[in-house]
Image (cartoon, rainbow, N blue to C red):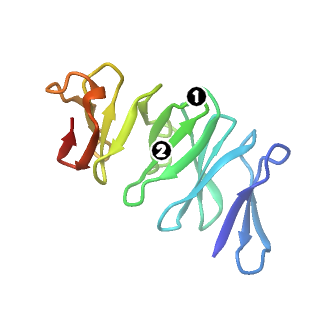
Amino acid sequence: LVLASSSGFSDYAIHIWEASTGQLLHKLKGHTSWVCGLAFSKDGKRLVSSSNDQSIRVWDTSTWIESRKMQGHSDPVYAIAIAPNTPLAASASKKGELMLWNLEGSDSADANAQQSIIHGNEQIIPLDHSRLLMLPEGRSPEIMDIKRKSSPKAMTRISDSTQVLGCYDAKHLFT
């Protein structure tokens, strides 16, 4: 069992520790500014890091070598989370921009294949393991399937997202 930590402003490396002994096992270098977020995949095969340097990096936990570098945010990436049963990660920037990333693949051609989900003050409600309900201000609610990488589809029967009070399950909205 291992733990991952970052030190802050003076050391941009990620430290991997043996949980039972506290011994430093690895020092992962790659970010050029402080590390803001760390997340292990559910299967433990990946560690994903986000940084003030506007990048997200994927580390292979069998070798502790960086397998991907992903960029797309225009400001520091403050948070990172990995979806439990998909190869997807979500990142959030200082300005509140949320992006979705496919963690599979390793070449640079697909390393920047992100999908922007939200900008500004839109609310997102997860419906199930892959669908999101997006509530953009002043517009109809939209549904998006992140697993299938579908474009948002407007729910035109509801003219304004402010009419949505909540969600009972993946099929019922309260208006």
Q: Is residue 66 above or below residue 53?
A: below
Element assignment for label 2: strand
| Front one among 97 and 49 | 97
Specify few, some or many for label 2: CA neighbours under 10 Å numbering under 14, 14-19, or 20 or more: some
The quadrant in which the C terminus is found is top left
Mark 1, other Cα within 10 Å: few <14 / some 14–19 / many ≥20:
some
Residue at x-position 75% and y-position 39%? 32
Q: Nearer the viewer, residue 164 or 17?
A: 164
The image quadrant where one finds the N terminus is bottom right
Answer with the quarter of the image where residue 148 lies. top left
Q: Tag 1 or tag 2, which sits nearer the N-term?
A: 2
x%, y% of residue 121?
Answer: 45, 27
Res 144 quadrant in image: top left
For badge 2, the amino acid type reads Ala
What amino acid is labelled 1 in the image? Lys
Find the distance from the CA under tag 2 to the CA under tag 1: 15 Å
Given the current orientation, which residue lies at the most extreme right position? 10
Please determine whether, in this image, residue 18 is positioned above or below residue 114. Answer: below
Disc marking residue 156 = none
Q: Is residue 163 left or right of residue 137?
A: left
In the image, residue 69 lies at what x, y percent? 59, 43
SS at mark 1?
loop
**In the rendering, which numbered label is found on residue 90?**
2
Q: Which mark is residue 95?
A: 1
User: Looking at the image, which residue sits at the far bottom?
Assistant: 20
Taking the spot 80% from the left edge, 74% from the top edge, the residue there is 23
In front of the other: label 2 or label 1? 1
Residue 150 in view here: no
Residue drawn at (26%, 23%), measured in percent from left and top? 160
